[in-house]
Image (cartoon, rainbow, N blue to C red):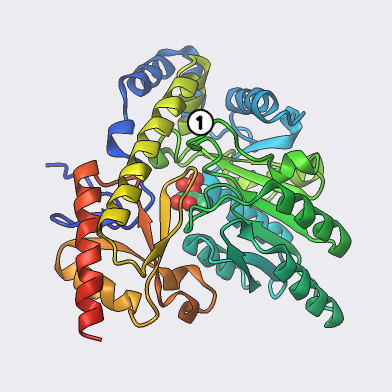
Amino acid sequence: MFQPDLPQGTAEGTISLLFGHPDPSTLLTPAMRDALNSAMNSPQFYGAFQYGPEQGTRALIKYLVDKLNREQQLGVQTENVMITAGSTGALDMVTRLFAPPNSIVLVEAPSYADSLHVLRDHHVRLRGIPMDDQGLIVTELERILAELNVANDLPIMLYTIPNYHNPTGITLAESRRVEILNLADRYGFLIVEDDVYHDLGFESTVPSSFYALADGKSVLSIGSFSKTFAPGLRVGWLVADKNIIDQCVNCGVLQMGGGSNPFSAQVIAEFCSKGYLEPHIETLRAIYKQRCEAALTALSRYMPSDVRWTHPRGGFFLWLTLPPTVLASEVKRVANERGLNFALGEGFFIDPADGRHNLRIAFSFAALPDLERGLELLAQVIETVRRHT
Ligand SMILES: Cc1ncc(COP(=O)(O)O)c(C=O)c1O
């Protein structure tokens, strides 16, 4: 008998605030089933079983071009967009093609642990730029760039998660984006913006993207359907200058294997063309806003007064800073024994010691009562660990 896999990182009987998995109720909705059925019944669906064009499924590229131009006033054309195997596939590809081994890649400190992993796979040297509650600190970036300039060792790219950052939930102020672009221009590095949470803001406004502010110059923007449709389909996209897209489309992996995930891309294209994506995104925003508010209420109700946390305006994550005497690893050990899981801050830093007193809470996945119960339990565990320190 076929046994379905448990979602990555989850265990029976444990409250999981560990990974940024979508709320299970948002997956395989009636609209998704309808799109799947009509895609399968269309005569073009044969193409979904064939090697596809290297740039990706045309219908989905066209949809994305319209969406990006309409919602972000970008002015992109089909030559600026390609479909990728999730945003992860896009980051892996651009690092492989544009960041040679040993080159320097700047990242926020902290940054998304799996992106650090992908970057490390390519043997680049990582350099972290500290953040505050407005995002990456520009004066720190400036200081580090000046230092690298003196050493004649300037970075090749900056990898940033500007909106509803993973792991902190922080959004980078628009004025800082402009300053960072000026620095990129002065010191000649690319900006790779990982904008997978773009559509999941709790308010109607989101700051202009790096790509929009730079009119596409030296910016590679990565998006994903993992958070707004389904991660299991592994579909993301890359927006960049034609020249960059051409290099990506001509890379070995795509030349050999055809475009990324034509099957999934056709299903998503059908979902979008039926007008289902926009209302789905509205539903998601309301769900995650409610979850985030419930998490913030539980934190203020239960947490000791010397624990601090971020106040996200979108996305899936909250970031906690524990008192200096309390080690997050110890909190996790005890929490795991009591049936609660979350991510340690350590994995999000280049030097794990920088995250010893931090932890990340994903509010996107666990059912609301579990989320609230989990945060109450977490507060109790923090007090237990403090008493034993
Ligand atoms: C910042 C960020 N980038 C990329 C991803 C992965 O996206 P995908 O499923 O499209 O590879 C995640 C998922 O948690 C993320 O938080």
**How many dots with numbers?**
1
Q: Give me the residue at 70% from left, 75% from top.
A: 102
Q: Position of residue 332 (x, y in %)?
A: 27, 71
Q: Give me the residue at 65% from left, 37% from top.
A: 82
Measured along the vertical axis of the image, is residue 152 above or below residue 261? below
Q: Splitting the image into 4 quarters, where does residue 156 fall?
A: bottom right
Question: Is 270 displayed left or right of 329 in the figure?
Answer: right
Measured along the vertical axis of the image, is residue 323 above or below residue 105? below
Q: The N terminus lies in which quarter of the figure?
A: top left
Question: Is 144 displayed left or right of 278 in the figure?
Answer: right
Structural crowding at the residue carrying mark 1, measured as other residues with C-alpha within 10 Å and reported as few (<14), some (14–19) or many (≥20): many
Which residue is the site of mark 1?
A: 265
Q: Secondary structure at mark 1?
A: helix
Q: Position of residue 216 (x, y in %)?
A: 78, 41
**Nearer to us in this view, 78 or 204:** 204
Q: Give me the residue at 57% from left, 50% from top.
A: 171
Q: Position of residue 175 (x, y in %)?
A: 73, 49
Can residue 27 be seen here? no
Please, what is the three-letter code of the amino acid marked with disc 1? Ala
Q: Position of residue 198 (x, y in %)?
A: 56, 39
Q: Give me the residue at 63% from left, 33% from top.
A: 53
